[in-house]
Image (cartoon, helix red, strand yellow):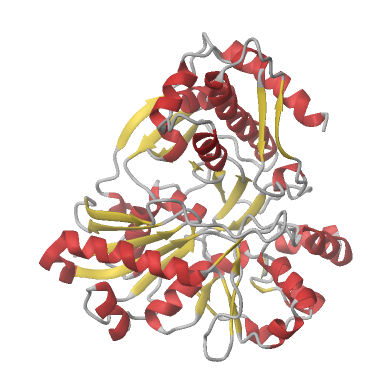
Amino acid sequence: MLLLGVDLGSSSVKASVIDGESGKCLATAFYPSQEMKIIALKPGWAEQDPETWWDNLKASIVDCTGQLGKRKNEIRAIGISYQMHGLVIVDTNLKLLRPSIIWCDSRAVSYGEKAFNDLGPDYCLSHLLNSPGNFTASKLAWVKENEMEIFSRIHKIMLPGDFIAMRMTGELMTSFTGLSEGIFWDFKNNSVSAELLNYYGYNPEIIPRQIPSFSVQGYLLKSVASEFGLPEGIPVSYRAGDQPNNALSLNVLEPGEVAATAGTSGVIYGVTGETKFDPQSRVNTFLHVNHSKDKQRLGVLLCINGTGILNSWLKHNTGNNLSYDEMNDLAGKVTPGSEGLAVLPFGNGSERMLGNRNIGARLSGLNFNTHTKAHLFRAAQEGIVFSFRYGLDIMKETGINPKVIRAGYANMFQSPVFREALSCITGVEIHLYNTDGSIGAARGAGIGCNYYKSEKEAFAGLNEVEITYPDKTRTDLYESAYSTWKKYLLSI
């Protein structure tokens, strides 16, 4: 039996097909080859057209089915991973009413802050475990106030993965985990928050029917199956936001286990069995994919908006058409601390870790006679790593105190400079695995359709490919550089 997983990111859409028994990846593809465009009509805005998602998803799947040949008919389940916190809205004909307001759009910050104060910190933190902040519920408040005609025509609201599942199956649903990531979920009452809906003036009918992440959620339509080159009727049996799904892909399911990513954004995601929260909502708590009434599993998430996107910006704007490997090689020739050059990597919108402030990306200590692009490449990676350290110190207050961080061998974790710096500044081992979000979604599909009899069975073929240990001979260099970096951050 083969399993298909798709991972809808903000840069690209990736599809992978795995053999369910061995866990081996048999086909994989991503589209487009260049990053998908993020539309920013005003500073702090970030939108994408869901039809573009669909076109790239279709291209990725067709590429995979082409690689498989006749074996494509052995695909028996589909799983979906998607960029979190986005807002998609449709009318009664299930037609899009506007582009999606995606995760890094910061226009709704003031709406979330007002809701936090009006509903009261005690209510928000005890029931929602978060401030409404800049999440999906607050994004919808912006639409309600600024696009009243569009708001009046809303039939249902969705997260990005809900839209993809709807297009595949014709069924309009959302997940419990998805509602928690949109800050619609009342953790005390184990239901959609009536108080939040009432505060914002939302009709409860705009919330789709809710289903578990692991469950059969509809079947592939004949017309869509034809476009994909697949048999009709394949079940969609898993959906989850990209960070809970990344944790699943790394077999991070139990309290104390921690996963990380460093793609467009950077995330540390730790699993806990306790209902804890950051009083300032700088890190956020959501339902994890394997949460149930009988077994509480929550994910505590630190998100840094500007990680890989900073590295990408440098790649495209520093000339010479250097590859990422060449940039990493140059960065590796510079001493930790970048000879006093410090970079704050916060150029991709408001940062929750900084209290929803948008301070922009910044350079400090630049010396024209000392620093080269090699210093800039290292300082950028160190700035990202130092942001992880700063956020991890906040996470420790909620009980997340890792000894090991698991990650896929992808994106910035392919950089030796990045791995060494992160391991040294956190004192934590970095364990890398042969997996990614699309492979995780495929495994999730196998769990959701009951092909796997236990979660443990789903991780055949998940192999550790590299471990980075803290280098104690260089820790002091990183600690000194971090101290300088932190003082610069706190001065702003």
Q: Is residue 66 visible?
A: yes
Q: Nearer the viewer, residue 93 or 296?
A: 93
Residue at 52% across / 12% down in the picture?
A: 472
Is residue 213 visible in this depiction of the protein?
no
Q: Is residue 146 above or below residue 492?
A: below
Which residue corresponds to the image point at 79% horizontal and 80% vertical from the top-left?
201
Please count the marks in the image. 0
Query: Which sits in the foreground, 231 or 346?
Result: 346
**In the image as oriented, which residue stretches furthest toward the left?**
70
The relative height of residue 135 versus residue 76 in the rendered view (above or below) is: above
Look at 44% across and 21% down and name the residue there. Answer: 469
* Quadrant in which the C terminus is drawn: top right
Q: Position of residue 375 (x, y in %)?
A: 57, 19
Judge from the rendering whether residue 4 lies leftward or rightward of residue 326; answer left or right.
Answer: left
Percent across and percent down for residue 295 are: 52, 60
Viewport quadrant of the N terminus: bottom left
- The quarter holding residue 491 reads top right
The x, y position of residue 347, in whole percent, is 66, 42
User: Residue most toward the bottom?
Assistant: 92
* Residue at 25% in and 46% down: 461
User: Relative to residue 472, is residue 469 depicted above or below?
Assistant: below
Place of residue 106 in the rendered image (x, y in percent of width and height, measured from the top left) = 71, 56
